[in-house]
Amino acid sequence: MIEDTIAAIATALGEGSIAVVRVSGPDAVNTVAMVFKSKYNLREAKSHTVQYGWIVDPINERILDEVLVTVMKGPRSFTAEDVVEVSTHGGIVAVKSVLEVILRNGARLAEPGEFTKRAFLNGRIDLAQAEAVIDLIRSKSDRAFQVARKQAEGDLSKQIIPMRQKLIELLAHVEVNIDYPEHDVDEVTTGVIREDCGVILKEVEGLLDRANEGKILREGIVTVIVGRPNAGKSSLLNALARENKAIVTDIPGTTRDIVEENISLSGIPLRLLDTAGIRETSDIVERIGVERSHDALNEADLILLVLNHHEPLHEDERKLLKQLKERSTLIVINKIDLPGLLEINEVEQDYNSEQIVYLSAKEGSGIESLERAVSGLFFSGEVESGDLTYVSNARHITLLYQTKKSLEEAINASEESVPIDLIQIDIASSWESLGQILGDAAGDSLLDQIFSQFCLGK
């Protein structure tokens, strides 16, 4: 039973048209009513209505701001408690003064993520849905947002719950066999175990097959653009970002440090890093930039090796081609608008046609081919966000692997005539692992760890 009332600013601090102070708890309406002046009685307001008035400091009757107050009574609210949202004018002074007077009159400042935590504790959402809320906030592309939205709506949970139901029914069947062996035979029960666990195992494997893709949509791909000076790395960054983020000149060595930009490429979030051109140099500053380029290569999920179509291969480039062929690398042959002097056959010795992209960053042609190549490298077919459920959360992926292991052990044990009561342990373990995704019996330390990642007011 949650007995206290919490409040926090629910919008980003800074200048804007409006800001919102969110209040939730059993005394939310009364707390705001104490500082709200209007011709309407807020305590008698119907749920899901908006009242116009002023927030007033009760100590000196000074008007703090002209506001709109929205009342949402539990359980028909985000937290399933009484919730009041005060919409103030945007700006730090107005919203902070409104929050301060609400805190002085009965509410306490909410902890990070406490509104979502209350929604979970009050049973309105499960833990998988709660974790998806932060993914919604942090989404870096439209597809990542759609994946998070579906999970927040319970898409993953709707797949987990039937699996758990099948497992609990299977556990009940096994329990009957253990308690009343005269009513069953082990061969029948082990057959049921193999069949039911096999069906659930396929569903779990289906989720895990798309887990890497889901994680990419959630976290993005660290992409390093590398190559010789004047190959067109900065031009490529600008073409992908669709703005002039990096300086482009004909002078070799213009880029001396790492230039970073976050973009969405066909719905796939990329963290682009434009690096200093790799070459031997006596310039101390440029040499530091080259060293940082090598460091960035070690951290990259995807490498775009840019080669100049208008120049023969340099020995530095030959070394990079050999060095990077075991990595997730795409060869970007730039400046195709100029006559070709590059030895394409040398590139094709180590890279297939799907890994080689031809474009002109200056003219913006061929970018679509690069988008398809990136998608093909990391995704099995077309990137979907409509019909498929992507598991993107590392905690969920770990628990699904634990479930898979327990199911496989139960199936193997049933085939090796292991006693039923020992097989029951593996079935119960898989049921518990799936339950942890939804938050069944989640400990305080886990909840604190998850919800501490949220911002105040969410």
Image: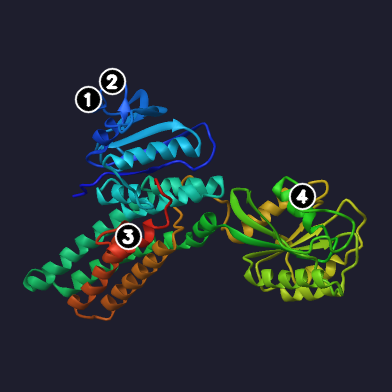
Disc on res. 447: 3
Q: Is residue 316 left or right of residue 455?
A: right
Query: The disc labelled 4 sits on which kind of residue?
Result: Gly
Percent x, y of residue 195? 29, 65
Query: The disc labelled 1 sits on which kind of residue?
Result: Glu
Disc on res. 366: 4
Disc on res. 192: none
Query: The disc labelled 3 sits on which kind of residue?
Result: Leu
First along the sequence among labels 4 and 3: 4
Q: CA distance from mark 4 to mark 2?
A: 62 Å
Percent x, y of residue 328? 65, 67
Q: How is the image coloured?
A: rainbow
Toward the viewer: 115 or 298? Answer: 115
Q: CA distance from mark 2 to mark 1?
A: 8 Å
Query: The disc labelled 2 sits on which kind of residue?
Result: Tyr
First along the sequence among labels 3 and 1: 1
Residue highlighted by disc 1: 44
Q: CA distance from mark 4 to mark 3?
A: 47 Å
First along the sequence among labels 4 and 1: 1
Q: CA distance from mark 3 to mark 2?
A: 40 Å
Which marked residue is nearer to the observer: mark 4 or mark 2?
A: 2
Q: Is residue 385 visible?
A: no
Residue 81 vertical position relative to residue 275 in the rendered view, above or below: above
Q: CA distance from mark 3 to mark 1?
A: 36 Å
Residue highlighted by disc 2: 40
Q: Quadrant of residue 204?
A: bottom left
